[in-house]
Amino acid sequence: MRAVVTSVWLLSLLSCLANSLGEQPDVAIHLCKIPLIGSNWSLCCATKDIHSATVTFFHQSPESSKFTDVAVVKHTCDTNTTSSDYNVACDVSKVKGQRDLILTILNPSLQQDIGKWGCGYYGKTSSLVILETQVLLQDGGVVRANKSENVRLNFTIEEIRKEQKNVTIYNPEGVIIANISASGMIQTDSKVAKTLSFDTQNGIVSLLLQNLTSSENGTYVCEVQPLMKRYGLTLIVLEKLDKPKITPSNVTLDLTPRKVKHGTLTCTAVRKSAGPYYYTPQIRIRWIYPQMDVGYNILVNGSVLTITGVNCTTNRSQPIFCEAQEVSGPMSDRSHFYPHSLCNWSPSTPVPPTIIQGGDKNDSDRSLLIAMGVIGILGFALFGVMFCAGKKNVGRCCSFCCRKICRCCGRTICRKCTKMDDEFYSDYISNMTREADDPYFTISRDRGSNWRDLLNVYSPGADMSLPLPPALRESTNTDENENEESGPNTAAVATNDVVVTGAEGVDRSVLIKEVEHGLKELRKTLHNAQTQVQVSRENLVRNLFDIYTDPMIVDSYLHVKMVDEQGSDWGGVSRDCFTSFWNEVSENFFRGSSVLIPHLPPHRLEEEYKFRLLGRILAHSTAILGYIPVPLCKSVVMVTIFDTTTIEESTLLEDFLLFLDQHDARIVQKALTDFGSLSDEDRDTLQDMFSRFDMGCLIQESTFRDHFLKMARSELCIKPRSLCELIREGIPQIHYERFWSQLTLDHLQILNDRLKPTAEKIIACLRPDESELNSRTETVYEYFTDLIADLSQDDLEILLQFITGQACVPRRNITVNFSDLSGMERRPIAHTCSFSIELPDTYESYEEFEAEFRIFLKSDIIRFDIQ
């Protein structure tokens, strides 16, 4: 019995996990219809589960070797074309997550608008080639034929009635398969069974295709030369459909006498023909049922059959059959249904994994014992609540019990009962309700304050270290931009309803939920078991490189032991280990100011292999920490993930301004906005910058922007590309599929904002222990918040790493407790595993508190000396 229960439970769990993964984003481009001379052409970009990424249409003409963007579709259906020669529209499918983006080419040119067309986003692209031979003068419609049979394609061509012309036949791939010369000589491709003939009297060219296969679907073109007029026929090869499915529904029973008062049967079948995208299959349903003396009545309406009056006192009835065919195709095998089975019909509902059909008395007794055990546990919990008598005491009692259990049961249970920071919010995100017609999570009202806390963690901060030019502000997520674009009423709505606009017009909360969902999927790749590792703080980088030479290390959590430090790892030591590692590695293997790019000097090329290890550590630390722990610029991430060096201009400009130091960036910003206002010193600085980055040209107002973009693309995309490839090789494939391949520029902006600690973010996370508040502790708490408001960016990161083990704001609250330490022992004490800090309440003034705390921040505080 136990084995059966366990098996059913495991199957249900696997099913839930499979459903939780969702569909992978996809994109594919097709011709919406056959291109005709003198008519507009249409291209359909079919997208699936691309909720927030920007989709771009591009074109490469035969005379050009470069792709040109012709239209951009942002979320949701915010369209923009580069020329009045194009028009873009959205067609949302009835299937959730699917939509067609339709690009219409207005007044197309046969010379300029043929060639390669495509659409895509950063994760994937799709393309097709429009050949000159595919552009028709006249479309002859559709010809259907069965697989393995012969079919004759008859092209009606008026020109050959007057005089014999050269005629060429092309297959759907644009390959010549037959031709007729002006002298009447016929040539056909000997590899394919076909016969070509012509009737000059009636103006008909006839192509006979024998023993059809599915690969011969498509549009065949007959070209008349030298007039270059083309006529087309689309061949659809039909196959026998699979056996259709009969589904009962809407059954109503009449109890006296016991009969089926009303019931509905629906017969459905799936197409098998592989016609072009613009071909709509026609499936015909045929019902076969007894006509006389059957004891029930039948009414047929297409694929739906209504049945009434079935006698339920007998378990026998004459069957009803259903068969299907695609119009003109072969008929499928029949499916059958016995009408008397409607008497026992009930809507299908999934059986809970704990419910097992059948069983004996022992099973019943065992179930009774389980029920009694559950009731006993609930009674014990109720007694505990009554005994503790109060919300605060309840929390203390629960914490006391949890500590006792952890001491006796080890880390396995403690890993579950002391959830890490990221697991808490992953569960929070997964428990949010969904609406049937909304592809995104909705926010529960009783969790509004928690959700605002999460938005605060991902907010970019009230001020930017480097204000960007107006041309770039459209592509950045800053509160400053939102305030400029919205009035006071809008700001009030954003505060109350937690709605913040993202870079591409996407609700910022939607992007945060998508990021959180991706991080949750990434965490699922880790086993609950922990791998014990020991590292030295003095040799941290070398130790981790040695540890990550084992590719299996990324499959589980780490339990880190710091040499000569007594701290026990309940999550805090691991966070501190990764944070310290990336701080040190950033100086030796990356370069940049506010954002970083991979870099390795030529004299250290023998260390190139370490970037593959860096990719492995990056993927694993992101899965464990719940955020990308190093501020890589968005362009570098795109190069790493998608192996592309074609990045949007606005992103290149923004990234390169953040890559430069603030002095150079401000001069570049000045040159981009008002080149004429540059002083001679500014021009010299820019010229030195051009020389430093190997730009062998003089700065000029007319070419500065283009040259700066080339320089940015070279430094951010071209030069580090080989190192980015090594990083990508180090990322495990399952990590890539579940998280990294799903990222867009909007998501990366959200993740980068996560890494920017500000005083406002930290203060919003602080929660003083109310049971310890009095006049002295309240004063010290105010000292602490005032000090945080005055700290520099570097000191804020040191403070966060001291309290939480990480240099960015955590998703959970930071508890502030108080102690009575004084004299030489007076110092703040941090508990990274529980995200808490103890502050002495023995300070007499803010100046005294500030002086000691700043000295403390400058000392070697990042050590785990207290267990």
Image (tube, rainbow, N blue to C red):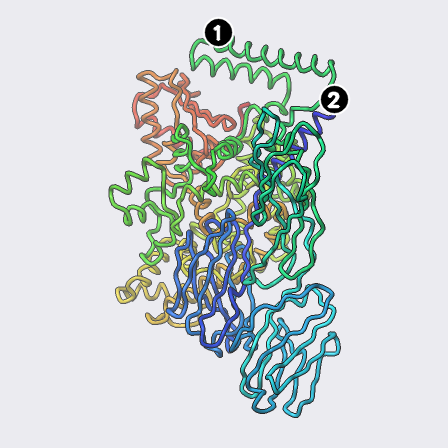
In which quarter of the view is residue 161 placed?
Answer: bottom right
Can residue 539 be seen at all in this image of the molecule?
A: no
Q: Quadrant of the N terminus?
A: top right
In which quarter of the view is residue 355 placed?
Answer: top right
Question: Residue tagged by mark 2?
Answer: 1
| Nearest-to-viewer mark from 2 and 1 | 2
Tell me the kind of residue under disc 2. Answer: Met
- In this rendering, the answer to whether 91 lies above or below 782 is below
- In this rendering, the answer to whether 842 lies above or below 794 is above
Question: Residue tagged by mark 1?
Answer: 387
Q: Is residue 603 left or right of residue 185?
A: left
Could you say which is closer to the camera, residue 244 or residue 779?
Answer: 244
Q: In this view, does 23 lie to the left or right of 473?
A: right
Name the residue located 71 percent from the left edge and 63 percent from the top edge: 147
Could you say which is closer to the camera, residue 618 or residue 300?
Answer: 300
How far from the left and from the top, in percent, is residue 494? 32, 40
Could you say which is closer to the camera, residue 85 or residue 691?
Answer: 85
How far from the left and from the top, in percent, is residue 473? 34, 54
Q: Quadrant of the C terminus?
A: top right
- In this rendering, the answer to whether 205 lies above or below 520 is below
